[in-house]
């Protein structure tokens, strides 16, 4: 219990002061001395029986803090309309009597940190530049239409500035950012903040959030998180935000920096020096922070945390400062350098590539004749086609002559050897039957094109990300290329034009589809500017459109066949001569003039031709083409 209270105020209203003093004397029997706000107290260390009760505005409270740092005096803040920031950051109750009770509660006494910004005290927050929504105190007070308007205003008004950030460990980074928010701590009282993490009030660290979107898409995601989801956490930090946790931070720029302290007056400086003074004041916090105080007192000082990998650097920083926010993120020079070296190696022809190409083709050809899907899958895994195709895609978008020539040469040689060995191998196999595995690759349609597109995306993405196993891309691309190539070789060996045309159309479809989708994926990942890639993408797209024409008609045939099958399959049974006849349609072939139907007829006794004709007439009613039945009779004997 405090025996003495030093009441620090500039309040002149005797009625207000008398009410406060009477309550303290009546409940705590403490002696009260009144002092002006400019009073500086000396030689007060270890005086645990004295409480300094501040009834001041925000700025005067900061001045008192500045004058009594590390003096080990016990302080509490009383509520008034002129100190909203102090009340919000230290949990001070709006009820004067509750605040006085908290001031005399020893459980709420806590050592706290203070944030200094260019030698000025901040209760909690420094904002540099524009954080676009993170610091709006009045956002939730608006109606939905106004919120949407605010959202789009932020979307079109982002501007970037060059920053150099240096931490207490002399870790330095240069980047382009729209703004920086520095928080000393956060509590349940900071309801206006989008930061949902509990940031300690005495861990000796400041927490800096740097808004630096590298693409329009990442910026839109950040705005959605702020304005609609309204929840940002270090666990799921948007890629547009960088994060630094440190005891000291220096922020500098070539020009003048605008910054605000605790949402108050605007300041300007070329360099902003930020420092956390750890455990420099003893303050009675509000009762709403009791649990936080207990948990914080168990915390130990944490190490510095730096999460800046997503921030723009070098060339991208220059682009952003120039006022251009790209639709997709531009890859860094380091990323592009490593990928380009890898792709140039992949584009070169080698005997290892040739050997694997021949072996995978022979294996696929064997699997096709054996009608064995597992053997064909083995050939897919073995195939080395992924490397030159992805290199070709990069060559297309960057107009790189070396990549284009080398990868095209490697591909042509690989395809030629595959056709040669599969056709020769076919001549030595005494089989001419077109198996189901072969037949499945003779009628390509738009669905096969989608396989190629997804394979190309997977290949480009896997090559650009070291953490993704490149074998996954190899499997995905081989699925689309090796089997049709082998079927084409079989067609050459058998002299079957229909087999050659259908399978090679599938191969070309997949090759062009993979190349185009991989190229577009590289653009999205930022490995080539759209302007530079236009020519290559244009020609590749023309090829895609030309190939899509026969695929479209083939796909429409599949749709038509599916519709016919549904209509015909609706007849599951019929009654002939008072006996129930079961009908099971197995396959349908949709020809130009008629529909060939393989059907299973289930009955208790053999049927006559007249009865089969009745079945045909019943099915004929369902479709607009002449049907031809191939009937398999199944006799059920009870």
Image (cartoon, helix red, strand yellow):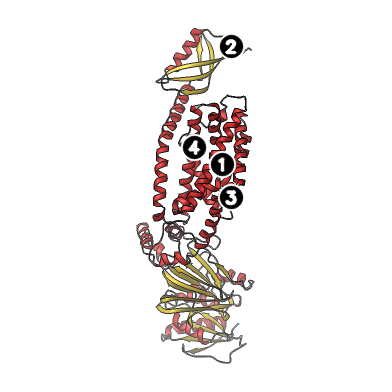
- Residue 604 is labelled as 2
Residue 476 percent location from the top left of the image: 56, 43
Q: Residue at x 40, y 55 (%)?
A: 532
Q: Label 2 to label 4, Cα distance in Å?
A: 44 Å
Q: Circle 4 is placed at which residue position?
A: 448
Q: Is residue 29 left or right of residue 222?
A: right
- Which quadrant holds the C terminus? top right
Q: Circle 1 is placed at which residue position?
A: 478
Name the image quarter holding residue 133. bottom left
Viewer-proximal residue, 433 or 577? Answer: 433
Q: Quick one: label 2 or label 4, which is nearer the N terminus?
A: 4
One can see residue 132 in this view: no
Name the image quarter holding residue 199. bottom right
Q: Residue at x 54, y 63 (%)?
A: 234
- Which quadrant holds the N terminus? bottom right
Q: How many marks?
A: 4
Q: Label 4 to label 3, Cα distance in Å?
A: 22 Å
Q: Is residue 535 above or below residue 232?
A: above
Name the image quarter holding residue 552. top left
Q: Residue at x 49, y 27 (%)?
A: 497
Q: Assign a secondary structure to mark 3.
A: helix
Q: Quick one: label 4 or label 3, which is nearer the N terminus?
A: 4
């Amino acid at each position: 219990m405090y025996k003495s209270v030093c009441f620090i105020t500039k309040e002149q209203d005797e009625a207000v002061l008398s009410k406060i003093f009477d309550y303290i004397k009546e409940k705590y029997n403490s002696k009260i001395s009144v002092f002006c706000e400019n009073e500086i107290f000396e030689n007060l260390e270890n005086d645990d029986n004295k409480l300094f009760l501040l009834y001041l505005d925000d700025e005067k409270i900061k001045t008192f803090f500045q004058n009594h740092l590390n003096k080990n005096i016990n302080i509490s803040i009383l509520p008034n309309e002129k100190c909203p920031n102090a009340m919000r950051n230290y949990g001070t109750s709006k009820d004067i009597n509750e605040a006085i009770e908290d001031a005399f509660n020893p459980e709420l006494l806590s050592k706290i940190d203070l944030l200094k910004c260019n030698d000025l005290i901040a209760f909690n927050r420094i904002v540099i530049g524009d954080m676009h929504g993170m610091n709006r105190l009045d956002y939730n007070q608006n109606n939905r239409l106004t919120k949407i308007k605010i959202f789009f205003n932020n979307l079109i008004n982002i501007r970037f500035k060059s920053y150099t950030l240096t931490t207490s460990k002399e870790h330095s980074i240069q980047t382009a950012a729209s703004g920086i928010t520095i928080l000393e701590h956060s509590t349940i009282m900071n309801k206006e903040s989008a930061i949902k993490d509990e940031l300690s009030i005495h861990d000796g660290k400041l927490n800096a959030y740097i808004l630096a979107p590298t693409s329009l898409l990442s910026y839109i995601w950040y705005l959605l998180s702020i304005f609609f989801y309204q929840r940002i956490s270090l666990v799921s930090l948007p890629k547009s935000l960088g994060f630094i946790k440190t005891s000291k931070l220096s922020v500098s720029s070539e020009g003048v920096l605008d910054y605000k302290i605790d949402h108050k007056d605007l300041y300007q400086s070329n360099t902003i020096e930020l420092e956390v003074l750890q455990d420099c004041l003893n303050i009675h916090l509000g009762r709403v922070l009791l649990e936080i105080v207990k948990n914080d007192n168990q915390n130990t000082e944490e190490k510095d945390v730096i999460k800046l990998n997503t921030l723009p650097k070098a060339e991208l920083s220059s682009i952003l400062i120039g006022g251009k926010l790209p639709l997709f993120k531009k890859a860094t020079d380091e990323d592009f350098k490593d990928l380009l070296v890898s792709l140039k190696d992949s584009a070169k022809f080698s005997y290892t590539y040739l050997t694997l190409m021949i072996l995978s083709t022979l294996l696929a050809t064997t699997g096709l004749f054996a009608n064995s899907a597992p053997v064909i899958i083995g050939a897919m895994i073995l195939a080395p086609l992924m490397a030159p195709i992805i290199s070709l895609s990069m060559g297309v978008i960057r107009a790189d002559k070396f990549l284009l020539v080398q990868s095209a040469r490697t591909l042509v040689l690989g395809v030629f050897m595959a056709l040669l060995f599969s056709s020769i191998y076919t001549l030595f196999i005494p089989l001419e039957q077109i198996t189901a595995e072969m037949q499945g690759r003779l009628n390509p349609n738009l669905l096969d094109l989608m396989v190629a597109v997804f394979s190309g995306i997977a290949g480009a993405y896997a090559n650009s990300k070291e953490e993704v196993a490149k074998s996954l891309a190899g499997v995905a691309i081989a699925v689309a290329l090796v089997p049709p190539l082998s079927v084409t070789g079989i067609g050459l060996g058998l002299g079957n034009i229909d087999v050659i045309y259908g399978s090679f159309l599938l191969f070309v479809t997949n090759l062009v589809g993979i190349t185009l989708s991989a190229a577009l994926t590289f653009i999205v990942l930022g490995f080539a500017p759209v302007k530079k890639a236009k020519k290559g993408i244009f020609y590749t797209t023309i090829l895609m459109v030309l190939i899509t024409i026969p695929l479209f008609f083939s796909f429409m045939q599949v749709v038509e066949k599916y519709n016919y099958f549904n209509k015909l399959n609706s007849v599951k049974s019929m009654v002939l001569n008072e006996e129930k006849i079961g009908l099971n349609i197995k396959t349908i072939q949709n020809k130009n003039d008629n529909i060939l139907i393989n059907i299973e007829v289930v009955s208790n006794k053999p049927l006559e031709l007249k009865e089969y004709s009745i079945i045909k007439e019943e099915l004929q009613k369902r479709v607009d083409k002449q049907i031809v039945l191939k009937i398999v009779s199944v006799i059920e004997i009870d």
